[in-house]
Amino acid sequence: MNFDFSDDQKQLRDQARKFLAEKCSPKAVRVVLDGKAPYDKELWKGLAEMGFLGVAIPEEFGGAGAGHLELCVIAEEMGRANAPVPFSSTVYLAAEALLIAGSDAQKKRWLPAIASGEAIGTLALFEGKGNPAPKNVKLTAANGVLNGVKKPVADGAIADFAVVAARTGSSGRDNDISLFLVDLKAGGVEVKNLTNLDPTRGQAEMTFKDCKAEPLGAAGEGWSILTEVLDRAAVLCAFEQVGGADRALEMGRDYALDRIAFGRQIGSFQAVKHMLADMYVSATLARSNSYYGAWALSTNAAELSEAAAAARISATQAFQHCAKNNIQVHGGMGFTWEFDCHMYYRRANAMALGLGSMSYWEDQLIDRMRKKNAA
Amino acid sequence: MNFDDTPQEAEFRATARAWIAANAPKQYEEELRKSSLGRTVLKNANILDVAKAWQKKKADAGWACLHWPKEYGGRGSSPIERVIWSQEEGPFGQLSRMFIIGHGMCGPTMMAFAREEHKRTYLPPLASGEKVWCQLFSEPAGGSDVAGLRTRAEKDGDDWIVNGQKIWTSGAHYSDYGILLTRTDPTVPKHKGLTMFFLDMKSPGVEVRPIKQASGASDFNEVYFTNVRIPGHQRLGEVGDGWNVSLTTLMNERSAIGAAVSTGFPELFEYCSSLMLDDGPAIEDRAVRSKLANWAVKASGLKYTSMRAISALSKGERPGPENSIGKLVAGSMIQDVATYALDLQGASGVISGEDAELAGRFQAMLLRAPGTRVEGGTDEIMRNIIAERVLGLPGDIRVDKDVPFNKIPTKGRG
Ligand SMILES: Cc1cc2nc3c(=O)[nH]c(=O)nc-3n(C[C@H](O)[C@H](O)[C@H](O)COP(=O)(O)OP(=O)(O)OC[C@H]3O[C@@H](n4cnc5c(N)ncnc54)[C@H](O)[C@@H]3O)c2cc1C
């Protein structure tokens, strides 16, 4: 047994951390946060040049062909740096959907463009309130055209293409849903930017009006593909969340050592020490659950669905917990726009919702555990 | 990243499995499986006898205290082999919990500080369960603040004479030996005047009085010392160096990983899977599922955290203070899980013992749980350890640190 990343993977992590420390300082993140740019184009280009965008894309489609463990390592660093780029929507959702269900031609069309940074992709699933469920997909597909409204769509305003979940049947079962691929530059989609909790990663409303679309995967298979995409993305997002949680903990720790009150470092007060210790505990549990998810993802194990749900819940909790208490440790300073604490608080709470809320993942986890126990 | 056994590990596992299948006391398997909450009860047998017999059998075949050197009764196994063994031993491993203080703390302390001839004399019968050991640290005046203890040891020729009182000593009533932390110099600051010994619990002047616990059981004791004579060669470490020696003990206590900490979660999940509530199966209930999911990820988080620690150990890294999280998380979780299981039982949850749901399994869990959060360092002490040693935050301010022990003001139960 070796339940750890390899030396090569750790080296990749160091490389990514160094790169992001240089190219993705909090100052750079703030350009996007303050609304001066929709995302950090320079950083996106740099990530492509480093080979990070295509790390899990096979070489024949223009990627590095490394694998998902390597992608997990990079995801953690993206979270740590709070990178203001459409990484999760493009790399975890759109690219993974293509890898799972794309035809050879579709893969050739989009995957090299993702790896090289030329194309931004996203998944258009949600339609207002509600969790991922076939019954919540109302947008219709008929005769190769889509009609309906999706919101929120992560990075929708900057995306070049979208994977769209559409209703193609009325049997009331999962196989009413099919997936489509839409070139957003080809017309037929109206995109409106939405303000959202975390401006460093945009959200949009997309209105499809007789929009031309090509099927992605077999008709009626949409829901089962989506479930797998969401599971994979849950593991990858968990690493971003673990990275963010770790960074929030580190910020809190550093501030507790620095700030003096009542003639002492505030980190010498037990209430503060214990709060930080609890942050460490939740970040550690999340990391361990995520490692298991990474193992399952990289080996395509049957355990993936359960591991993904556990990683998702644990990492969401840890990031929210660390981000909120980081502000608490910082006191009044923590509640200023000037300090970086709120960027992590925003990201933590936005990420908690992006793949379906906690109640969705709780249900998934329990269903999957029951299935395993019954087997 | 992989969970596969290396060929060597696979061979070890197969050998262990075959031996356990042929030798384990199977008649107790079901009962052991059902008492997974720190309180093992066998209906028709004395648990200590059963535990001793199993331990002896293991020792004779070379399966006791696997990681100890062979000359002291172990097998010289790697950390991974130890884990594989505990996976294969399954519920029978519960029996070894009777010896956890001896094997986890006293043994390693002896190994680090006893004379060679003592190691060869005392360690093999400790490994084989023939002799049981206890740890005599805590006192009314010194629990979390171990160094605040007052039991005195005074030199008398080559020997030492001990007077004082210990408390909460687990297993003292059936122990043959104990490691004993004493004060040998009250005129220096508290950490500097301590000395460690080991002693025969049958020595004249040792009196063990069982204490009835909050749970109703009596696993721990008060131990009184009246002019107990300990030969000088039974000193562990230097005179005045007892604090250091005890730190070794406490570090070992925390690194006794491998056996997963129990959280109560598997029991609760199993219970909810078959439980019917007024509105249908518990497992279909939104609120129940949410609770379960939140505990599930804590339990799995702990499991994989210990796997990460084992991977690090197998690469030669030392166990660190991060291992403190197991008990910290599991302790309060067991308590919450038990509380919730009783809540699901409604008014009848109040019934305990044989007449209760599942023969009172969760009621027993509830009543034992508070002890888990105190023994081996309280939740607060665990958080201090994480904050100070993992995160590098300042130590608590210690007003008594540089004051001679006999000048420290005292008040309260001491
Ligand atoms: C089931 C059980 C078995 C045990 N077995 C043994 C044994 O075999 N051998 C042995 O030597 N001892 C044993 N003990 C004793 C155990 O180690 C002590 O009870 C424990 O260390 C706590 O000490 P205390 O009881 O004196 O509590 P106290 O130290 O008086 O603590 C009371 C409260 O104050 C808090 N507190 C104390 N100091 C601090 C601090 N610095 N910061 C924050 N909070 C603090 C504690 O967390 C706790 O909440 C056992 C205890 C139990 C419950």
Image: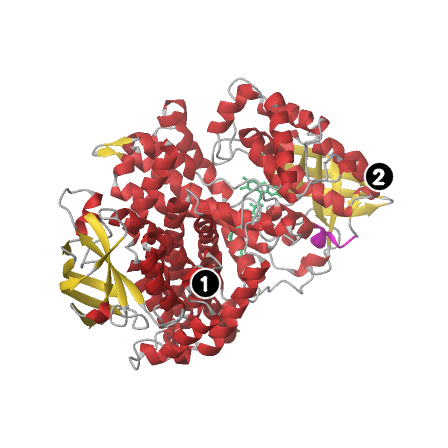
The span shown in magenta is B239-245
Q: Residue at x 39, y 40 (%)?
A: B337
Are the two marked residues, 1 and 2, in contact with CB atoms closer than 8 angstroms?
Answer: no
The mark total stands at: 2
Q: Residue at x 32, y 56 (%)?
A: A97
Q: Nearer the viewer, residue B104 or A170?
A: A170
**Mark 1 near ligand 1 (CB under 8 Å)?**
no
Residue B171 in picture, x, y percent from top left: 62, 33
**Closer to the observer: label 1 or label 2?**
1
Residue A180 in picture, x, y percent from top left: 23, 57
Q: Nearer the viewer, residue A35 or A179?
A: A179
Up-down relation of residue A141 to residue A323 (above or below)? above
Q: Chain of mark 2?
A: B
Dot 2 crowding, Cα within 10 Å, few <14, some 14–19, many 20+: few
Q: Nearer the viewer, residue B165 or A39?
A: A39
Q: Chain of mark 1?
A: A
Residue B266 in magenta stretch: no
Whether residue A229 is visible here, answered yes or no, is: yes
Q: Which residue is mark 2?
A: B117
Amino acid type of disc 1? Val
| Residue at disc 1, secondary structure | loop
What distance separates the C-alpha of mark 1 from that of mark 2? Answer: 59 Å
Amino acid type of disc 2? Glu
Question: Are marks 1 and 2 in one subunit?
Answer: no
Q: Which residue is mark 1?
A: A55
Q: Nearer the viewer, residue A251 or B119?
A: A251
Residue B108 in picture, x, y percent from top left: 70, 44
| Residue B192 figure quarter | bottom right
Residue B242 in magenta stretch: yes
